[in-house]
Image (tube, helix red, strand yellow):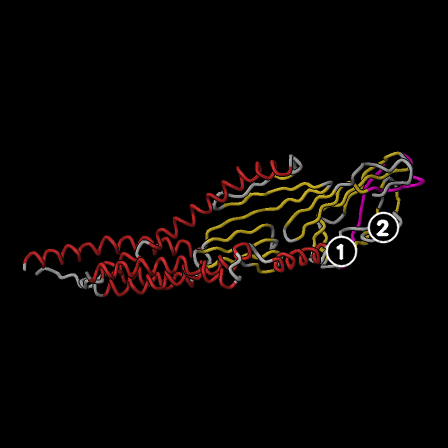
Amino acid sequence: MKYELSINWPGLAAGALMLVLPFAGAWWVGSLGTGAIEIALSPFDMRISAFGTQMSLLLVDLFLLATKITFIIAGVFLVLASAFPRRWWARPLMRFGVMKPFWSVIGLVVTLAVVSIIVNMILPHIISGISGGAAGGLRLSIPFVVGASSSTFTISNATITAPVTFSLTGTFWFAAVTAGVGIVARIYHRRFMEDTEEKKKQR
Amino acid sequence: MKEGALKWGLRLLGLLLSIGPIIIALGIRGWDVKATVMPSESEIQEVQGIVQNIFGEGFSENTMTVEEPEISDSSIRATVHFNSPIGAPITIMEFSGDIYDGDVKIGEISMEENEVQVPARGTATFHLVGSYSGPAPSRPKTYWTSFVVEVYGLEISIKPPEQGPFPTDGGEHEI
């Protein structure tokens, strides 16, 4: 007897994980010193504090809120599409958001890598050019996505050494797992499409 | 046809969620692009005020007072009272100097403790110990050569502009 596929189980799991992900906390944290500057980042939230004072940018906050809303909507769509995979609306709903966790994970890593390259290799030249060499006492060094390093700044007869640490949180790996399950769900959904096409031909 | 309409609806939803934040932010900031993209002047001044409040006016001649040093054999010991102008807890990691008898350097002095914790705008006491060569100094003076503190995990190393006593007035970095 042929087993009839009725529910996209990986899709249900991915949808549930996507509904939890926006509330699971930061994916990446960075700090300068101990409490001098702290950054907690995810595609849904960004918290920056300097000497214990929270800072925010309205435009960034709204973008991140929109991303959170998008993820929640995509998660709901994914759950519906996975529970009723043979309906005509299942495929568009599935495709609306199943790859969003994947691109979010990739996007975060690429963004951090680009920022690291800019700060380590390009920014010192820009500062040197603007200051006409007066910023010779500035040595910027930040880790590449994760790790630890230190930057130094010399002014007059004082030298400030600032340790910098970057790390990925457990929530990032939770997001990576969600992305993986989403990819599996998308591949698995093709079985339903093939199954539906087969039934249409038989009619 | 239904599937096509749904696809377009989902695309519009995505577009709305991408552009919506920009329009809302512009509306809140009175359609001022600069004000939307950059932090407001008041926010910048607030941060500057906080930093200024923490670091205050910096170190001054009232920051440190040194008691009369105790001289015994070939060693010197002095007690230092430190009044922190910093509005955050700091840790004094290193304090070292040179010992002079008149204009002649006779030895070096450094902090006896490994580190000294100082509360925000608080006071702390630590000791400097060192040894000298030659006869007991008649006019011992110590001039600091290195001062390292840690605040918010940042290590700040300060050195005097010139080493040794000043040729005329005894040195602004005498301690």
Give whichever of B149, A88 is nearer the camera.
Answer: A88
State left or right for residue B51 relative to residue A14.
right
At a point 53% along the width and 39% down the height, the residue shown is A120
Determine which residue is flagged by label 1: B85
Residue A101: x and y, percent?
35, 55
State left or right for residue A156 relative to residue A90.
right
- Is the C-beta separation of discs 1 and 2 under 8 Å? no
The magenta span reads: B122-143
The quarter holding residue A123 reads: top right
Residue A29: x and y, percent?
50, 53
Q: Amino acid at mark 2?
A: Val
Task: Looking at the image, tell me whether mark 1 or mark 2 is earlier in sequence order.
Answer: 2
Give whichever of A160, B66 is nearer the camera.
Answer: A160
Determine which residue is flagged by label 2: B66
Residue B118: x and y, percent?
73, 56
State left or right for residue B57 relative to residue B172.
left
The quarter holding residue A19 reads: bottom left
Give the structural element (helix, strand or loop) at label 2: strand
